[in-house]
Amino acid sequence: MEKKCKYCAMMIPKDAKICPHCRKTLGMTMPVKVVIGLFLFGALMSAIAGNQSTPPTSNGSNSVQKEKDMEDYAVRYASIEFLKKQLKAPSTASIPDLYELQVTQKPEKKNTWIVTGTVDAQNSYGAKLRQNFRFTIRKDKDGGMSLVKSNFQ
């Protein structure tokens, strides 16, 4: 059984993927088209279902969590900046990543955090030392961060 090539109009075998006369690739077969169509339909339906998020609760817990996450990031970032200022040779230091720091909020003070971590840096004599640090950081009224206390061990 043969069919006609849609490019050169020559008769070719029905199961040919490439026309032996013009060497053009012939289109996809119907089963392949059906499988691709079903895949695209499933992807579209899952995208639609994924966009239906739960509405925010009346107490605004989503916005409260976002605000806490932003504060946590700001505290971590500020502590790294304070750390760089405290070191003798910050360019030689192995500064910890933001999320390698341990951050705890002081329960008795709303806008105050304790940040602890470890840094490897050169001292004034050029020796590379590992030091543990502990910072107390406070959020200012203008939204900035202040270093209240710093300890190196």
Image: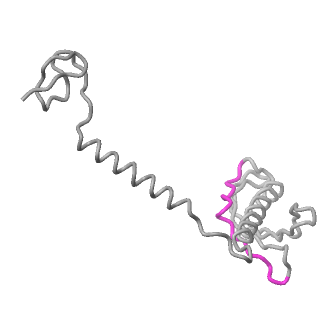
Q: Is residue 58 left or right of residue 28?
A: right
Residue at the image position 89 percent from the left and 69 percent from the top: 148
Can you say whether 73 is above or below 104 in the image? Answer: above
Q: Nearer the viewer, residue 68 or 16?
A: 16
Q: Residue furthest left?
A: 1
Q: Residue at x 68, y 62 (%)?
A: 130
Q: Position of residue 113 (x, y in %)?
A: 80, 73
- Of the 4 image quadrants, the one containing the C terminus is bottom right
Q: Please say whether residue 137 is one of the residues in the magenta stretch.
A: no
Q: Residue furthest bottom?
A: 108
Residue 81: x and y, percent? 80, 56
Task: Please name whichever residue, 153 or 99, is drawn nearer the observer in this view of the structure.
Answer: 99
Is 89 placed left or right of 1 in the picture?
Answer: right
Point 49% across, 55% down: residue: 47
- Looking at the rendering, the stretch of residues picked out in magenta corresponds to 92-108
Q: Position of residue 79 (x, y in %)?
A: 78, 62
* Residue 99 among those drawn in magenta: yes
Closer-to-camera residue (134/105): 105
In the shown orientation, is residue 14 left or right of residue 109? left
To which quarter of the image does residue 117 belong? bottom right
